[in-house]
Amino acid sequence: WDETHFGKMGSYYINRTFFFDVHPPLGKMLIGLAGYLSGYDGTFPFQKPGDRYEQHNYVGMRGFCAFLGSCLVPFAYLIVLELSKSLPAALLAAFVLIFDTGCITLSQYILLDPILMFFLMGAVLSMVKCNSCADRPFSASWWFWLSLTGVNLAGAMGVKFVGLFVVLLVGLNTIYDLWDLLGNLSLSLVMFGKHLLARVLCLILLPLALYAAMFAVHFTVLNKSGPGDGFFSSAFQSQLIGNNLHNVSVPEHLAYGSVVTMKNLRMAGGYLHSHWHLYPEGIGARQQQVTAYLHKDLNNLWIIKKHDSDTADLSDPSSPVEFVRHGDIIRLEHKETSRNLHSHQHEAPLTRKHFQVTGYGINGTGDSSDFWRIEVVGRKAGKLIKVLRSQVRLTHVATGCILGSSGKTLPKWGWEQVEVTCTPYLKESPNSLWNFEDHINPKLPNISLDVLKPSFAEMLLESHMVMIRDNEVTSKPWHWPINYQGLRFSGVNETDYRVYLLGNPVIWWLNLVTIGLYLLIAVSTAVALKRGVQLTTELKELSRVVLRGGGQITLGWLLHYFPFFMMGRVLYFHHYFPAMLFSSMLTGITWDALLKFCAGFLSPSTTARKVYRGGFLTLVLLITYSFYLFHPLSYGMIGPMASDPSSPMAGLRWMDSWEF
Amino acid sequence: MLGFLKKPVVVTAEINMNLVALTVMGLISRLWGLSYPRAVVFDEVYYGQFVSLYMKRIFFVDDSGPPFGNMLLALGGYLGGFDGNFLWNRIGAEYSINVPVWSLRLLPALAGALCVPLAYQILIELQFSHCAALGAALLILLENSLVTQSRFMLLESILIFFILLAVLSYLKFYNLQRHSSFSGSWWFWLLLTGVACSCAVGVKYMGLFTYVLLLAIAGLHFWHMIGDQNFSNVSLMCHFLARALALIIIPMAMYLSFFYVHLTLLYRSGPHDQIMTSAFQASLEGGLARITQGQPLEVAYGSQITLRNVLGKPLQCWLHSHTNTYPIRYENGRGSSHQQQVTCYPFKDVNNWWIVKDPGMQQLVVSNPPRPVRHGHIVQLVHGITTRYLNTHDVAAPLSPHSQEVSCYIDYNISMPAQNLWRVEILNRESDTDVWKTILSEVRFVHVNTSAVLKASAVIGASLPEWGYRQLEVVGEKLSKGYHQSMVWNVEEHRYGKSQEQKEREVELHSPTQMDISKNLSFMAKFTELQWKILTLKNEDTEHKYSSSALDWITMDTNIAYWLHPTSGAQIHLLGNIVTWASANVAALVYTCLSLWYLVRRRRKIYDIPEGAWQPWVSAGGICVGGWAVNYLPFFLMEKTLFLYHYLPALTFQILLIPIVLQHLSDHLCRSLLLKSMFSALLVAWFSSVYLVYSTFSPVTYGEPALSVTELKDLRWKDSWNILIRKQ
C-alpha cells in the first residue's frame, strides 16, 4: 500500500535523485538512512502495492519503523504515570496501545506515521517531564527536557505538517506556564525574563534551526535531477545536476522563430501545454485542448511567430534575427500539432467566468483570435524580453483577457492536467504571469545562466509553498473515532495474504465512551470546585489530576482531530491515529479516576479496594480478549472474505462497512 | 404645582431627545429619495426573484441562507401590492410601473436607520458616557457603506439590526440581573435576546456568529454566578433553566417557525423542484403532483414504473434503455458485451418505463389481488418497450472500467448467460417485511449473482460518447461501500400493468398516468429535507468581477459598483467612509495593546485604572472586539465567493469600539487639563473630517447628483477602487 510511496522516496535518497512530495523530508530521510545502513541499495522499483520484494533487503526499513512504533507504548506509560502519579492508570493506557490492532498494523510497515507518532509522543513526554521539573528551574534535567521538547517538535514538524498540532499543544501549555509564573509575585521580573528567554530559545529557535538544517540536508543529498523537477520554478531547477537547466546556456533574448517553453509563475504552476485531444462536446468549442502540465514533455514546445507574417521566412538561416519586444503582438504556434494558441468568448471548462483557451488553425494559419500581446511586468515598450528572468503577461488582443492558469485539475478527458483559461479580470497575480524556460534558436549565441542562484531561504520558502497543495477526500473525519471503515493494506482477493488497518473496535469504542465520560466528570468536578464544595485531600488531588492532566491530554486530542474537519486535502483513516494516542491515554486517566471516585464512596476500604481492582482487571481482560479476537487483522489472514459467512472472521464483522 | 408638572416632562424629554434626534437623522439619511434609482441595483436582481416567487407562491430553494430575510423583503412587496410580475434578469434594468420600489426598499432602510439609536443605547448600557454614545451613533450614521447597503433591497442592514438588537437586549438583561431577577422587564429583555438572535440567524447564517458569541458571554456570566455563594442551588437551577429556555429553545422554535411559514406560503411547484426528492415534489401543487396524483402506493409484480436516481446531481435522471447496443469495441480498444444499452436519461421518455416481474412467473400484468413486492424480494426488471431484461455481468463498463457493465440482455448464444435477478433492498424501511412504495421508498438493487449494486455514475464528464447519445452512464458497482445516493433509486411514476400483449402494452406505456390520491409529507420531514438541501447545495465556486478576499476588507482596498446611470455619470458604489474605517482599525489595535498591557500589569498586581473602570472596559471589549472577530475571522476559512458587504456586521462592531477607546483615553490617559483640552480639539477636528469624507462621497452613496469625469477621477483615492468612468 503506501509503502510503495514512502519506500520509493527512501530509494530516491539513496540514489540522490530529486523528487517532490507533500510532506517535509525528515521522515523519508530517516527511512532512507535506515535502508542505507541495513544495506538496501535503492534499486527496488516500488511499482505497485503487492509486488514481492524478492532479494531486496527491506527488513531494515521496516524494522526501523516498527521499532519507533513500539516506543509509543513506554512513552504513553511514562506520560500517564507522570500526569496521574498512578501506576494502574499508566498500565491501562499502555495496555490499550499494546493491544490495538490499528497501531500494530500501522507501525509494521514503511510509513511515515510511526515516525510522526514517535516524535509526537516524545514531545508530549518531554513537555510533561519538564513541567514536573518546574520546581527546580534551570537545573540540568530541566534544561535537558526543555531542549528535548524542542528537538521532538522539530522532528514532528519535519515528518508531516500534522506535527504542527503538537507544536500548538506545547505552545499553549507554555503560555499557560508563563502566565502562571508571571502571577507569582515572589519571582522578580528578571527571573521571569530568564524563563521567557529559555523557552524562546528551546521551543522556538532550536526547532527552527533543526528544521532548516533538515532541509539543508535534504537539498544537499538530493542534487540530481529527478521526477519532481516540474513542480519547481526555473531558478530552483537550475540547482539540480542533470536537469536541462543546470549549467546550461541558452540565448538570452527572445526572438521570432524561437522554440520555447513557458512556465506559469504560480507556485507549482505547470508548462503551457497542448496535445492532439479536443475538448469534449458540451465544454466550450470543440477545439484542441490547451492545459498546463507539470512534467517536461515535447508537447510543451511552442514557436513564437509574428502576427502578420509566417514562419517561412524566419526559418531561413540567412534572414536577420528579429527580437521580440515588449508590447509586440505575436502568435504562438504549438510545435507538435501546428495549431495556434487561441481564445474566444466561450466559457472555460471549470472556471466558468473565464474564457476558454484552445489550439486552433491548421499548420499555423488561424484567425485574428490567435493574436496575443506580450508584455513584461514593470518594463517600458520596446524593451527586449529575457529568457527565465522576465515575467511575461500575454493579453488576448480580441477580447482583452489575460492568459492564466486557474490551478484547477481537469477531469479525465483532460488527462488530469491543470486548466488554462483566459481571465477577463485584470488583477495582477502570479496565476497570469509566465516566464520562458527553454529557448532554442540556432541563430543566437548562448549565454550561461549562473545568475540564477536562489539562496537557501528562497529554496526553503519555495519548497514549502509547493508542498501546500491538495487533492480529494476519501473518508470523513467523523467516521474515524467510531472505527467506521478501515483501510486495506495489502491483498484484495480471497487467496491473498491480507492485512487490514482497523482499530481494535473494543478499544476504540471504549475510548469513545471515555471521552464522553471524561467530559462529564470534568464538568461536574469543575462545577463542584466552583461551588466551593469541601473535598477531602485525596479527592482534591484526584480532581487536580482530572482537570490538569486530563485537560492537557484532551486538548491534545482536540488539536489532533478537529482541524481535519476544516481540511480540504486527502483524508485517510490513519490520520486519526495521533488523536487516538491521546484518547488512549485519556482512557487510562479517566478510568483510574472514575474507579477511585467509586471506591471513595464505598466506606470499608476492603470493598473499595476490591471494586477498584475488579474494575481494572475486567478492563484489561476485555482488552486482551478483544485483541485475541482481532489479531488476524494486523498479522495477516488468508481465506474467504469476512462477508462470506463461512469465513472464520465472519462473526467479527460487526459493521457492514468493514471489508476484511 | 407647576414645578411638579414640569419636572418629569423635562427629564424624560431630555433623554428621549437625543434618541429621537438620532432616529430622525437616521431615517432621513436612509429614506431620502429611496425610490431613486428606479432600476435594479446589484443583488436586488437576486433577492427580487425570490420576492416575485413569494408573491406568486412558487416554491424555490435559496442556497445562500434561511428564508426569514427573503420573507421580510417579500412582506414589503406584499404591503406595496406587488404582483410579482417583473423579470429580474439584469442589473440596471428599469423597473416597470407595477413594482412598488419604495415599499420594497422600505424595510431594509428602516432597519438601517434604527441601527443608529441602537448603537447609542448599547454604549449607554455598556456604561459609557452619553457623549461617547452620541459619537458611536453619529459614526454609524455617517458611514457611507452602511447607508448604501440599507437603501436597497438587500439583507445586510436587517441582519445588522437584529445583531445589534440582540446585543442591546442582552446587555439590558444583564444590567437588570443584579437587582431585579425574574422581574417582568428582566424576562422581556431575556426573551428579546433569544428572539433577536433567531431572527438574525434566520436572515443570514452569518447571524450564527453573533449568536454563538452571546451564548459564550452568557455562559461566562453564568459561570461567575456558580462561583457566587449567595445563590442557592435551586435559584441557580432556575436561572439556568430560564436562560436555556430563552437562548436555546425559543430560537430553535422560531427558526422552525420561519420554515413553517416559508413552506406554507410556497405551495406551488416551481423552478427548483428537481433538486428535491420525489416525495417532496409530490407535495407541491402542480408539477410532479399532477402526474403522481392517485398512483397506486404499493409496487406489485407486474407494476409499470419509472425509476429516478435519488442523487439528482449533476442532473436528475431516470433509468433508461433503448434498442441500440454497446459498440463491440470502445475508442480505447476495450471490448463490450455488445448488448442493449442501459443509461440514465435526464428527460421523461417512454423508454424510461420498466416492468417489475416475478422470476418464477411469465406474466407481466398485475394479478388480482396485487402481490406487493417487499424488502429482500428477488425481481426481474423488464424494459417496457423492448421487453428485454435488466442484466449485469463481469464486463467492464464503458466509462468506469472498475465497475460492471449494465445492459439489457440479448441472447447471442455465446458463453454469456443471462444474469438478470435483482434483490430489492429498501433502505428507509421500518421493518424487514416492508412493502416497496411509490415515491417514498428509497431502493437499492443488488445483483444476485455478483452482488453488484445498480448505480448511476454521477460524475461530471460521465456522459457516454456519441454512440450512447450523451446520456449518463449506469454501472454495477462491485465495491458497494456504505450508502451513496447514486446507488439509490425511487419509483416516480407507477401504474399497475393490465395488458399481456406487447402491442397493447406499448399503447398503455405511451398513455399518461392518471389516478388520484395525494400524499402529504409531515412538516418536519419537509423541513429536514429543505434544510439539508440549503446547507449542501453548493453553487459553483465562481469568480465575480467585484469579489474580494477577506484581507482586502480591513483596509477597504476594494469596492463594489452597484449601479450606473445608463447615460449620465451618476453611479452608486458600496464604499466606506475611509476615515471611519481607518480609525476603527486604530481603535481595535489600541484596545488590544492597552488591554494586554493592563492584563500583564494586573498579573503583577499593579492596577493602572480603578476597578470600576476596568469592568466596563473588559465587557465593552468582549462585545466589540469579540463581535468584530467572530464576524470577520471565519471568512478566512470559507471557500465561497466573498464580497465587501460581508464585512459590514464586523465593521459595525468595530465602529462601536472607537468612542469606547476615545473615552478611555481622555478619562484615564489624559491626566492634565491641557492634554484634555488638546484631546477634545483633536476630536473635533477628527470628527469634522469624518463628516467631510461622508459628504464628499455622498454622490456615489446616494447616486445623485451626477458627477463629471474629473470629479469622479478625484474620488478615486485608492488605485484599487473601481470607479466607473464613461468613455467619451
Image: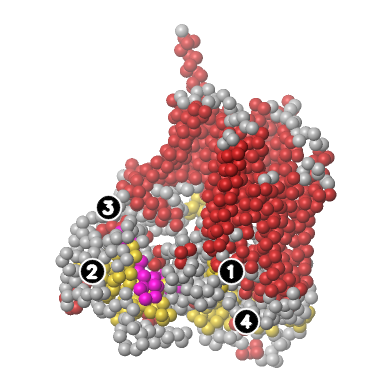
> Counting other residues with Cα less than 10 Å from the Cα at mark 3, is it few (<14), some (14-19), or many (20 or more)?
few
Q: Is residue B20 visible?
A: no
> Which residue appears at 25% of the width and 78% of the height?
B387
User: Which residue is nearer to you in this view: B643 or B493?
Assistant: B493
Quadrant of the image occupied by residue A282:
bottom left
Q: Residue at x 39, y 87 (%)?
A: B328
Q: Amino acid at mark 3?
A: Asn
Q: Is residue B24 left or right of residue B367?
A: right
- Decide: marks 3, 1 in contact (CB < 8 A)? no
Task: Give the magenta range.
Answer: B439-462
Residue placed under numbered mark 1 in the picture:
A635
Residue with the mark numbered 3: B520
Query: In this orientation, which residue lies closer to the viewer: B294 or B721?
Result: B294
Rounded to the nearest angstrom, the CA distance separating label 1 from label 4 is: 44 Å
Helix, strand or loop at label 3? It is loop
Q: Please state the chain letter of the residue tagged with numbered disc 1 in the rendered image.
A: A
Q: Is residue A456 left or right of residue A362?
A: right
Which SS class for mark 2?
A: loop
- Chain for disc number 2: B
Q: Nearer the viewer, mark 1 or mark 4?
A: 1
Seen at 48% across and 54% down, the residue is B564
Identify the residue under disc 2.
B301
What is the distance, in whole Å, between disc 4 and disc 3 at their CAs?
61 Å
Badge 3 and badge 1 both on one subunit: no
The single residue placed furthest to the top in the displayed view is B1
* Above or below, comparing residue A252 to residue B261 in the picture: below
Q: Amino acid at mark 4?
A: Asp
Percent x, y of residue B165: 48, 36
Q: CA distance from mark 3 to mark 2?
A: 26 Å
What is the crowding at mark 4: few (fewer than 14 residues within 10 Å), some, or many (at least 20)? Answer: few
Q: Nearer the viewer, mark 3 or mark 2?
A: 2
